[in-house]
Amino acid sequence: MPDFRRLYTKLTNLEIYKIKVLIVKYFNLVSRNHDLLSKGITLQAGAAVKRSRREAPLLP
């Protein structure tokens, strides 16, 4: 049987670092995409409202 505890600590130090890097990259990506997404959604919503007003001016 190998000493799993020693192996585990060696693994975790590297893995924790990798995971941290991945998390940071992921969050940066998500926040950038979220800004773009929210802008895109508001633009699309505005365009949809304009389109619906132009197509159906009888709506209150």
Image: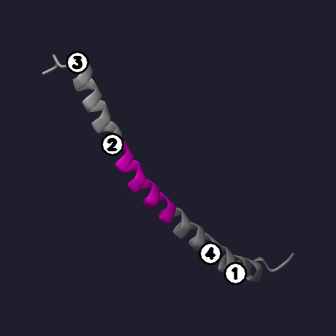
Nearer to us: label 4 or label 3: 3
Residue receiving disc 3: 56
Residue receiving disc 4: 16
Say above or below: 3 vs 35: below
Amino acid type at circle 1 is Thr
Say above or below: 19 vs 51: below
Q: CA distance from mark 2 to mark 4?
A: 40 Å
Q: CA distance from mark 4 to mark 3?
A: 57 Å
User: Residue 9: which disc?
Assistant: 1
**Circle 4 SS class:** helix
Residue receiving disc 2: 43
Residue found 75% across the figure and 83% down from its top: 6
User: Residue 53: which disc?
Assistant: none
Magenta residues span 27-42
Q: CA distance from mark 3 to mark 1?
A: 67 Å
Q: Earlier in the sequence, mark 1 or mark 4?
A: 1
Residue found 28% across the figure and 38% down from its top: 46
Q: Are marks 3 and 1 in contact (CB under 8 Å)?
A: no
User: At which x and y percent is residue 31?
Assistant: 43, 60
Q: Are marks 2 and 4 in contact (CB under 8 Å)?
A: no
Q: Is residue 29 magenta?
A: yes
Amino acid type at circle 2 is Leu
Nearer to us: label 2 or label 1: 2
